[in-house]
Image: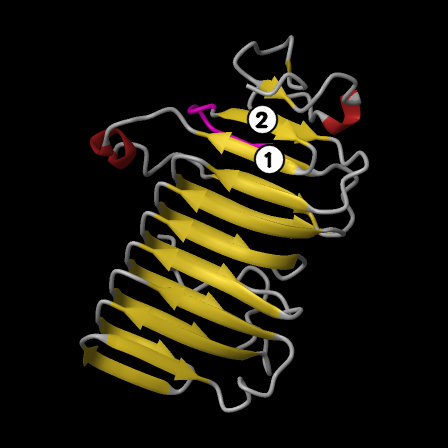
Amino acid sequence: MDKSRATDSTNPRNPIAARGTRPEERCGGGDHFAAPLGSSRSGRLRFTNGARRVAIRADVHMRALCHARFGDRMPMVGVRGGMVTIRHPRVSSCDWLGQQSECPAEVTLNGRIPWDIEVRGGASNLVADLRELRLGSLILAGGASHLEVVLPSPSGTVSVVVLGGASNVVIHRPNGAAARLRVGGGATSLRFDNRRIGAAGGELDLRSRDYDGATDRYDVAVTGGANNVSTDNQRVARGQGSGASA
């Protein structure tokens, strides 16, 4: 546990970011969490044992480092500097299936600083609208299923990595953003921009025409196979999704 983390007196299960967090940044509710921005110039969001039924977004107007709202399954949350660590209690797969009607957790990140996002232990039913974020990297280890990501304009080469297989995953990037998609372990029902692949074994390496000469671009890599995975460069209206998180 981080020594800098305090406990919300209104809910002992809910650790708050640090002593001295202002009341207006704590959101007041027992299932809410907020961390002050302080002197942080960058952020890192890390799920240590999976992210299920989570919505992530960014807000360039917020003052805090991050805000979060959780349902009945309150996780342990720690903050050290600009790193926010979220650890959900371990539950059986049947318990997760029984929570499909539960509202997803919501995590909002400060869009004025760059962020790296990492999920260890698998991601499922996750929606990440990162259009207002400066994204350094996105790493999903342990597989991903029913995932939808809306990416911001890239700065430099930005890595998006899925380790352990991907199923029913949609990744949108802005119009004109160059991208490369590498898949190891075979693929079925794969789409990369206007290219569609019904089935392929072994390794795949697909690139947009301008990828090699682009300074700002996305490098997307999937290991462990891909089923029903789409990467496109179409504009997505706010509030509009593909239903990947259903």
Residue 106 image-quadrant placement: top right
The dot on residue 84 is 1
- The kind of secondary structure the magenta stretch mainly shows is loop
The amino acid sitting under disc 2 is Gly
Looking at the picture, does residue 191 appear above or below residue 102?
below
Towards the viewer: 214 or 16: 214
Give the secondary structure at mark 2.
strand
Query: For the residue carrying disc 1, how many other residues have a C-alpha within 10 Å: few (<14), some (14-19), or many (20+)?
Result: some
Looking at the picture, does residue 204 appear above or below residue 142?
below
Which segment did they paint magenta? 68-74
> Left of 82 or right of it: where is 93?
left
Q: Residue at x 62, y 58 (%)?
A: 135
User: Does the magenta portion include 71?
Assistant: yes
Label 2 belongs to which residue?
78
The amino acid sitting under disc 1 is Val
Q: Residue at x 29, y 75 (%)?
A: 190
